[in-house]
Amino acid sequence: MSMKALGVKLAEPAHGDLPEGLSLRRFSPLAPRGIVIGASTGGPQALAAVLERLSPHADAIPIFIVLHMPNDFASVVSGYLERLTQRATSIAEHGEAAKPGHIYIAPGNSHLRLFGPPSGAMMALHDGPPENFCKPAVDVLFRSAAKVYGMATLGVVLSGMGADGLNGARVIAEAGGSIIVQDAATSVVWGMPGAVALDGLASAILPVTQIGDVAAGLLRGIRPGVRP
């Protein structure tokens, strides 16, 4: 199956019709073993659009989310996403082992960090200072995911104000992983995804309705620009 068969149009890194000044990196040759997602303003709606399409294909890997939100809103989002995806979804707990097929959301007042081997990643919460004026911060999650999963890391940056996730996306890219960002047209605010795209770190810049399908394809070994 090709990306065309999925109904997804993707610009290849060496070609494609990208806005002037933007370029794409090639996707990692490895299928993701962990997916990390960052979002802020417009995030709940974007997460729903992505996970609804991605979750049916995510039995073998955990998904970790940082959404900038008040602490008491995290459980509301968790419950909503679980009902939407029919996949176990919970607030991450300190010292918890990540389970394949599970969606974890950082609590609203703690940074979420991953550690350990890819086959048995663990989660740690810590009460450090805000990064990018954010707590939890996408950068904290992304940096730690790159150390755990390396080239098998897939980062997704969705609608949000500011530039949280930029530095973490850079670490994922340096580790050989891949980053998908939401495009400007479907973002409420193209701050976070725009910062990553403008830095040349993204492997794809997509409408939010296509991100889940592309991520699902990557889990099955389907990479843009590579014939099966």
Image (cartoon, helix red, strand yellow):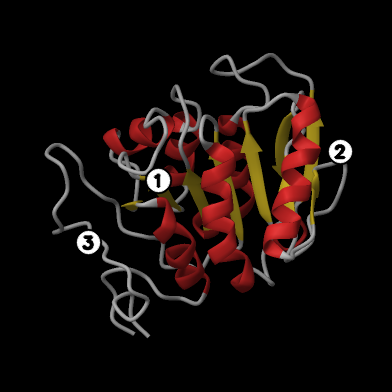
Q: Residues within 10 Å of mark 3 (few under 14, many from 20)?
A: some
**Which residue occupies 74% across, 65% down?**
86
Q: Position of residue 224 (x, y in %)?
A: 31, 68
Q: Amino acid at mark 1?
A: Val
Q: Are marks 3 and 2 in contact (CB under 8 Å)?
A: no
Task: Find residue 181 and name its label.
Answer: 1
Q: Position of residue 9 (x, y in %)?
A: 26, 66
Query: Which residue is identified by label 3?
Result: 12
Q: Earlier in the sequence, mark 3 or mark 1?
A: 3
Cα–Cα span, label 3 and label 1? 15 Å
Cα–Cα span, label 3 and label 2? 40 Å
**Which residue occupies 67% across, 65% down?**
61
Q: Secondary structure at mark 1?
A: strand
Cα–Cα span, label 1 and label 2? 28 Å
Query: Which residue is identified by label 2?
Result: 94
Q: Earlier in the sequence, mark 1 or mark 2?
A: 2
Q: Residues within 10 Å of mark 2 (few under 14, many from 20)?
A: some
Q: Position of residue 220 (x, y in %)?
A: 50, 77
